[in-house]
Image (tube, helix red, strand yellow):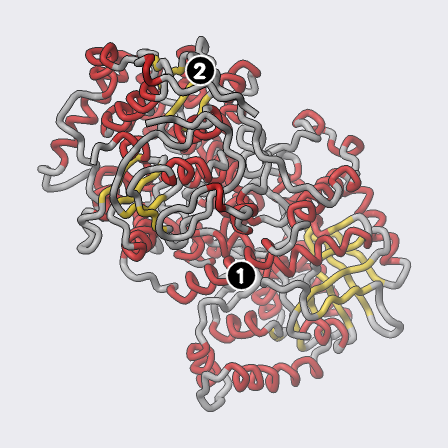
Amino acid sequence: MEAAPPETLRPGPSALMQGARFVKELTRGLAEPGQFGSLAQSAERSSKHNQQLIAAIPYFQSWREQAHQIKRYTLANLDKLLEEFERKITARGATVLYAQNAQEANEYLIRIIQDHHVRTVVKAKSMVSEEMELNHVLESVGVRAVETDLGEFLVQLAGQRPIHLVTPALHLSAADVGRLFQEKLGEPFTQEHAALTQIARKHLRRYFLEADLGISGVNFAIADVGAVCLVENEGNQGLSTSCPRVHVALMGIEKLIPSIRHLPVFLNLLGRSGTGQKLTTYTHLIYGSTPGRKLYVIVLDNGRTQLLRDPKTWTALFCIRCGACLNACPVYRRVGGWAYGWVYPGPIGAILTPQLVGLQEAGKLPFASSLCGACGEVCPVKIDIPHQLVHLRHRAVEEPSPVRSWPERIVWRMWAWAMCHPWMYRLVMRVVRLGTRLARFLPWHPGPLGAWTRGRELPEVPPGPDFRSWWKKHAHELKIFPSNLPPETPRS
Amino acid sequence: MNSRFEPIRSTPTVDSGRLTPRQNHEGPLPDQVEQKSSVGPGVGGVTGMVSEKTSESALGTQADKVGLDLEAVGWSATEQKREYPVYEPGEPVALFVPCYIDQFYPQIARATAELLTWLQVPVEFPSRQTCCGQPAFNSGYWKEACRVVHHFCETFAPYRWIVCPSGSCTAMCRVFFRHLDADARIIEIGQRVFELTEFLVECMGVGDVGARFPHKVTLHIGCHTRRELRVVEPPLELLRYVEGLEYVELPNMEECCGFGGTFSVKMPGLSMAMGQTKVENIIRSGAEVVVSPDISCLMHLSGILRRHPQGRNIRCMHIAELLVAEE
């Protein structure tokens, strides 16, 4: 068979380079009313809703810990479990293909398309397919791929990228959707939710019946029974995986869980953390292919093995893509998913992206956080996101990346030296104090000072001396008066 | 004026208005139980980077060493509250005054020293102290931060108790030192650092410090204090006993104010946007005074408040200042 030109198969670097936009465009106008007002509200609302749901369950913390331990075990024994999964599911007629990187996965997929003479593809939601830039690749070989997840369908119609892991069209209001349907599908404008859903349904139903190939992601691949688990609310995954003759399931290597006994814990966590549901509407377990049909499972590495080697951050692979950290993140709520430049937005993206595509491309992402720790608090598999962010910042300044700069390093070296010598500290701080007092009289503030005063006043330095000088003079005035001694009370 | 030397057990209720006394309190609120969820401070912060079960060396050859024992996790894995050491009266306490408090807010350090002295605590100020190393640590310059941490540990090694009027710097010492240097001595010295309010309430068992502050006050707790140290109740506990104080809860109090250390100047737009939301919430709460155990957050917030037409008259205060205020 003839392979398509490699350029079209490789995810475009243009998509990755957007990482730099984070600091440039998207944060500049943020003091003004944000363009993502609705995003912030819905993310906040769903975060609160999830927290309420979770607070009602006394077991939730133990579920988190169990899920954490299961994932820890899985990733430590990934080689064995992957083999077991492959053996079990192949025995029931599926084909398992391993891809090193996105390009290889795309080549496999194109071969499948050519072997089965596929013309139309329906796609259920899959983040791995975004990693592969699948829609572009399919377009380049003349195959039409239709997103069938309602959110993804809207985003595809609008020619955008998903803004959120779980709810890709979070930024579109009902009116936006109405206009989009009017413009792209020629439907009369409406902003009623039910009517909009009917329009989407009418158009999508046709594609399900026409399609020759269905592509889906994988939520959990279960090793001991050799099954693929998919969860959804809309029913599109059920149709995408069962209507067409051929089903291709795309998964990252970390999607495994050892046993079907472990599935309930994850289903409980995923629904509640992701969309605030006790359970998703549909849970599909696909054990293999039925006679006359084909099932392919493409297992993608794409940098994950490399990430697995880092003992400080390998737990980032525990992620079950629930999006809880996005909803909780004050930064994400304000900039939205596109600012993160690649497939995975939010705090989890800020630790996954630099490790999957390299610090060279995405070294700035770990700095896009105030380290408030809200993400780590809500993560259902207890990924220690805030600490990993700091660790990646460390790596970003040590390894080749856009944030590594010699001037900055020299400044920090000098700072460290000054902080190790108290006399130098006093001298430097005296200059800083004086500078802060005088800064208000300057017409223009350079560098970080300007960044501070753009929307904030500098702290008012009180006229007296600093604390240590005061202490030298006045410490003796602080006396303990025996008459104040509290009555002796026994401690329990 | 009398101090209460008894350990705190229950959670204070946080309804608006005057804080209800502990005695009338039925049980902890659900959202506060939730906040108490993770491993105690110092042990793991939000969640341990590498859990106790699996040491880093084991991860090198992860394969056979990681077992799966869900029975061990059980069904009641709600983590324990941190056990605080008990401060015995008369033990000397070293005051760690973070650099920005030393320079920009000396009155806070003064208030802290006065407050502790008032409570019969002999306060000492090791004059060689400088910084905890957090700015460099958060910026990724760990080697440089490590040097400063070593200096910190040398300075404070002789002291059993180290008290700091800043939650964020305390979190650096207690939670983050272990990322910089695995030396047991360094980590142990880090464990001796306590945030002022948690030292007063948890280690000393003080609730009432005899303060009077007849104003409408709201409380902001910095994220490091809240999530890394898990210090949420102590500041509330102290405010509850302040005479004349009317407490109003800050809407969305868990959300970050956007300061984030160097984040505030590296991504000023974002930092400002987050600060704006916080400031709007402060104004919405109707408070006259915002109080916090973290003055770094307030440095950022007061900067925004002073430019805000409705926020201009809202005062920002460290909790130590409030507790010694004579108003």
Can you say whether A253 is above or below A184 in the image?
A: above
| One can see residue A138 in this view | yes
| Chain to which mark 2 belongs | B
| In front of the other: A185 or A465 | A465
- Give me the residue at 42% from left, 38% from top: B237
Q: Is residue B209 left or right of residue A146?
A: left
| Chain to which mark 1 belongs | A
- Indicate the position of residue B54 as horizontal and vertical percent values: 70, 30
Query: Which residue, given by chain and number where applicable, does mark 1 sit on?
Result: A49
Q: Is residue B292 left or right of residue A253?
A: left
- Indicate the position of residue A386 as horizontal and vertical percent values: 51, 40
Same subunit, tags 2 and 1: no
- Indicate the position of residue B224 as horizontal and vertical percent values: 44, 37
- Give me the residue at 34% from left, 47% from top: B247
Image quadrant containing the C terminus of chain B: top left
- Give me the residue at 71% from left, 27% from top: B58
Q: Looking at numbered disc 2 in the image, what kind of residue is underneath it?
A: Pro
- Indicate the position of residue B246 as horizontal and vertical percent values: 31, 47
